[in-house]
Amino acid sequence: MATLSDIGVSALINILSAFAFLLAFAVLRIQPINDRVYFPKWYIAGERGSPRSRGNLVGKFVNLDFRTYFTFLNWMPQALKMLKIFVPIAVIALLILIPVNVSDGTLSFLKKELVTSDIDKLSISNVRPKSVRFFVHIGLEYLFTFWTCFLLYKEYGYVAAMRLSFLASQGRRAEQFTVVVRNVPHTSGRSISDSVDHFFQTNHPDHYLCHQAVYNANKFAKLARKRERLQNWLDYNQLKFERHPDKKRTRKKGFWGLWGRRVDSIDYYKQQIKDLDRSKCRNLPCHRSPHVRLMQRLNVFMTLERQSIIKDTKSILPVTFVSFKSRWGAAVCAQTQQSRNPTLWLTNWAPEPRDIYWRNLAIPFISLSIRRLIISLVVFALVFFYMIPIAFVQSLANLEGLERVAPFLRPVIEMKFIKSFLQGFLPGLALKIFLYILPTVLMILSKIEGHIALSTLERKTAAKYYYFMLVNVFLGSIVTGTAFQQLHAFLHQSPTQIPRTIGVSIPMKATFFITYIMVDGWAGIAAEILRLKALVIFHLKNIFLVKTERDRERAMNPGSVDFPETLPSLQLYFLLGLVYAVVTPILLPFMVVFFALAYLVYRHQIINVYNQQYESAAAFWPHVHSRIIASLLISQLLLMGLLSTKKAANSTPLLAVLPILTLAFHKYCKHRFEPAFRQYPLEEAMAKDTEERTSEPNLNLKAYLADAYLHPIFHSFEEEETVEVRVDKHQTHVPSPPSEPSSPSPAHYVHNPPPPPHYARHPPPPPLYVYHPSSPPHYIYDQSSPPHYVHDAQPSPPRYFYHHEEP
Amino acid sequence: MATLSDIGVSALINILSAFAFLLAFAVLRIQPINDRVYFPKWYIAGERGSPRSRGNLVGKFVNLDFRTYFTFLNWMPQALKMLKIFVPIAVIALLILIPVNVSDGTLSFLKKELVTSDIDKLSISNVRPKSVRFFVHIGLEYLFTFWTCFLLYKEYGYVAAMRLSFLASQGRRAEQFTVVVRNVPHTSGRSISDSVDHFFQTNHPDHYLCHQAVYNANKFAKLARKRERLQNWLDYNQLKFERHPDKKRTRKKGFWGLWGRRVDSIDYYKQQIKDLDRSKCRNLPCHRSPHVRLMQRLNVFMTLERQSIIKDTKSILPVTFVSFKSRWGAAVCAQTQQSRNPTLWLTNWAPEPRDIYWRNLAIPFISLSIRRLIISLVVFALVFFYMIPIAFVQSLANLEGLERVAPFLRPVIEMKFIKSFLQGFLPGLALKIFLYILPTVLMILSKIEGHIALSTLERKTAAKYYYFMLVNVFLGSIVTGTAFQQLHAFLHQSPTQIPRTIGVSIPMKATFFITYIMVDGWAGIAAEILRLKALVIFHLKNIFLVKTERDRERAMNPGSVDFPETLPSLQLYFLLGLVYAVVTPILLPFMVVFFALAYLVYRHQIINVYNQQYESAAAFWPHVHSRIIASLLISQLLLMGLLSTKKAANSTPLLAVLPILTLAFHKYCKHRFEPAFRQYPLEEAMAKDTEERTSEPNLNLKAYLADAYLHPIFHSFEEEETVEVRVDKHQTHVPSPPSEPSSPSPAHYVHNPPPPPHYARHPPPPPLYVYHPSSPPHYIYDQSSPPHYVHDAQPSPPRYFYHHEEP
């Protein structure tokens, strides 16, 4: 067991290293060369140009404005304001509990028999059994619970108000008028679109505007992806060929290029693409220019494929996006039951277009409950039995197994240094790999569950990851044995025994968790802000790969905040803090430092780095709230268990009221605030409608909503189709080469559509292929024409768009 | 332990006695003299006149049409059709399990050591440990579960369809257009009615029609009840005085007439009433006729009180009934969230007017969650610790205690016969009284919880009673010790141990439950149909008390079906049947007989006897469904526990899948059907609206809805107020004496209002004071005027009714 000075030294080392990280960050972030790593969001928003364009040569790479070096710590006071829960708890716990615990001094008498750490002298372990002092601990547990609940209540109200005012302040958005309808019934002799029209014209006659059918484009998207991959390889090989025309690039014909006859790479990919296209469009007329031919083939291929989807009534899914004339009408439809059969015509507020996970719209509604049942069983198994396959892999991945598989390695393996390295490394490898891919696995499981919004997927993944952490990190560290053994033990213990078993080990594990907070928490957070991996990769790419400005942007796309991983970790720290607040208060300062760092780092990252793919409007908060409540309950139960082993029979029953009060508080909060996160209040909807009606009385809402909820692959494609028509018309007018002669890269061959007309008024669609106005002009897209010409050229609504004819 | 022949004899006796009951019923029900006991509903519906008016003298009392004696068993084939679940289960279980169980014969070897009953030889106890035969039991458990779930699924669908078609077939009813709004916020400088008007005109501009404020009439109702009680006593004494003018009736002045100076009763009550009135209306002009004076005083008293309520803005509750122009508008408002603060403007589908429990509308909404928390704790305590106060009372209620309290009784108590009787009787008395008043206590608890509909109150009471029965009858009979001891034991056992502890006792208790089914079930049901208590009371009243036809009707008001008591009992039998189906199948025939009887009896009672106070439209079904699912789960867990004690380690895990499947089925059903029981689908609402618009285009909905949701005490009163005016106008026209000179009973003095005009078109309001056209004419109410003259005389809408002025 670690002594107090051990912990102190460790803390010093860790805090110094964390400060070193931060110092490194503080210096690195103001170097222009790293600008794209630490401020990518600004580039995406278009508010920063390339930093190298200003100043002299040195100033392009190193920040010479020395004043900025002195203000790099001015975020600190801000951070302290946010630590409302743990700073007061830490101060009170340290001031009151440590004197109470230290002065009783049981453990000093037992010193010779038991190996106890200095930390234990500061903890509740130091108090004699049956002591009256336990009343202090119980009182503080009450105080901390009330304090946490009070802040949670205020925070929930604040977050809810912020959410509503955010929604109210938003401009017009497609999702405000739209409802997703699932399980549209098949009526014989009537298409799905017809029955949707008929149903909503009948039941919402004053509010129904139009609807947009959803096509099963999953196969199409797969084909398009395959073709793009082939094209990408072709481009890559052609590029290499252009750079080094002397070096011939070849490839084996077989599976993954691993075996088969060796052929020329460029020819191989050209042939592959041709085969793919031929299967779709056999009667394609031949053109002269190979590039134009390729492009046209691609477009025709896509047009044909798309037409076949739209023509095929079977590809219309029983899901549809129904739009209403007012926000009020949409809010009403989303919140009410439509049909006498409660499983048909299920309406829900539509997620914003870029938040939709299109692939899951094709899942038959009937299978959803089965999917959810199966996935919850799988997650349960994963949480409790994940060690079984890993142990199996570990048993294989030993040195004997390796020698058997690869006998030629024997002389290398038998070398003493390598052998000891492998023996230490191999068994943990499987576990490391498992933990690394776990969030991905959980995300896949959530996708199988069939949620249709990315935000929901992330929330569900975060929940699954939290369960895993709770059982395997928290309980797993406290109780010995694997999760499976714990489960077995818990099933055979009485419900009152479980908190005692865990509670009694809680104080002993304080040093472990302090170390955990420092190593995993402090260092992890510092590494997060330094973005070491991203930094290295960016510079490597910058040196070796990037040829154009657009390539550089692609290389540094930061993605969204990783909610599924970060939220459960933060919640786990909350749990640790609340559990140890009364038991071993010395842990709290470490926690406070962690949260201060985390606040700082994530605040910076969200402002400057991550580019959120969708706007959830605080939809995660109810989950965070209930996790903190769960942490409170766990801490109360464990304290009860711990006290009951301390024979504090006259004080323990006092604690029994607290979980009931906490649960009641949770129920109250759920009732009080949660509807604001699930539904759109009619009052808000009506207010916004009225405001808009006065400010824009002549708004053509139907035009605004047209194609808002179209599968992105059709979006990107619709443009090209029109372009294709233009190219066909001006066959003689060979497109002029792009303005930068140095980068005629055919890698830009496809899918850079201008935004559809309504995007001018609201945020861009899911950037399947992000459109950048600053990128070199697209080689087919005619820049001279006005950006809206696409829809001007096609004023008649497309086939898949159904009207509600007003009487 | 009982042998098989014991059970047989007992069954024979019980079935014979049940048949004797039924025979007695079959004969008694066709005697005209009992007509009002066995067919009261027909009298209430007005479809049967007094039977004595037809036929000769004997025919008035005895049925002489002998053909009716031969058809009195023709209900039997009907009954068998309804026993879909248990008849097939019983047949299969008896045919398959009994041979399987008997032939293994463990117990025959053990006979000498263990005292086992013959019943046990037919049960699962007879199968050797580790036997392969347990696969048969597991297979049958699967089969029975699937069969039950299949029938439940079909039944749920059928009930839901019936409910919707019932709702669709109903005529126009106030609740279809009305929504109850709770927690209307107080806005300073604006009355509640104004803010309701403003809010709904803003947020439902096309649909809002009007609203009706709710006044806190609880004090008023209490005063009126007190006055009526005094008046009743006065009438009673006057009646007695008229019959025996020689005998003077006196009363002590003090509390409950127990002490104080002895005074003349008539004078005493007159004085009391005068005092009560004087406190309200001091300046009342004096009139000549004492009766008219009394009546006027009553009316003026009520008018003043009512005016004071309506004038006092504080008596307007933050609850209101909001009506809409269409069912669609009401359905939308009931199902959506109105305000940005989710705890304000809470809308719900309004219960029908006679279903409302007015008193609870005055409960502040904020206290509801606290009330629910407290009541659930109280119910938990009641279920598990009810023996503690009873044991305490029992310890007091022994002979020594009695002698100490009443020493003068000592000589009587000391008599040997009386002593032994008391010793046997007293200890059980407290428990008997407790069990007798338990449903009432639970109903009071539900009322404290604050539900505003009688149907909800009954559902909640039924749920509480079921928990009580489950713990104290089912578990209490299986596991020894009080519920509190069980709770203690279960808390200290592992979760896997509990099913084993209970499961292993299950087969041993089969004989007990068979006897229970016969004694409590068969005899209870037979007693229910005979209505012995009602029969005796009716005839006693008929002979001694009833003076007028109206008195007779009052004497025989059957009330509603006692859902809170009957439903949990039936659900308990379901549980028994499902638990023993696999364990001791010989119990099933007894169960089938019970359900057949119960079907017959309740069918008869609902058709002929009970007069349901409200129409729930199958709102109880989801609860019944989930209780049966819970019974299935309990039976599966107990079978798992039982098998694990039989060392059937290779077969028990097979069962583990079943509870998961059952739960998944339940979740599916909940999702599939329950919304139909909670919400009004827009499709239905719109269909009914459209239909009505074509059939009655000129309907004045506002007039139809006027006063539909007025507190019944104002209703009954509004009439009188008008009558009062008339009496004042025609002061000289002293009302003619009633047509039957033999019954000038002043007991009819009050509250016999004619139905308000819209009642002609829909069912009558809560019969606080049931109006009977056949009763002798009301002594103030002028029969010569048309029945609607009340509203004709007051065409202007009353003060408390707010209009939405249409633009």
Image (cartoon, coloured by chain):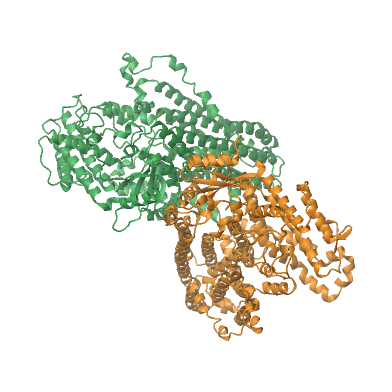
Chain colours: A orange, B green
Residue A783 lies left or right of residue A702; in this view the side is right
Query: Residue A665: x and y, percent?
Result: 45, 60
On-image quarter of the C terminus of chain B: top left
Q: In this view, does A272 lie above or below A646?
A: above
Residue B656 lies left or right of residue B327; in this view the side is right
On-image quarter of the N terminus of chain B: top right
Residue A731, quarter of the rendered image: bottom right
Q: Is residue A425 above or below residue A495?
A: below
Numbered circles on residues, count: 0
Q: Which of A41 and B376 is in front in this view?
A: A41
Residue B324, quarter of the rendered image: top left
Q: Nearer the viewer, residue A719 or A485?
A: A719
Query: Residue B278: x and y, percent?
Result: 15, 46
Residue A269, quarter of the rendered image: bottom right
Query: Residue A187: x and y, percent?
Result: 59, 36
Q: Nearer the viewer, residue B719 or B652?
A: B719
Query: Residue B243: x and y, percent?
Result: 17, 28
**Residue B504 showing in the rendered view:** no
The residue at 66%/39% (across/down) is B137
Q: Is residue B346 above or below residue B706?
A: below
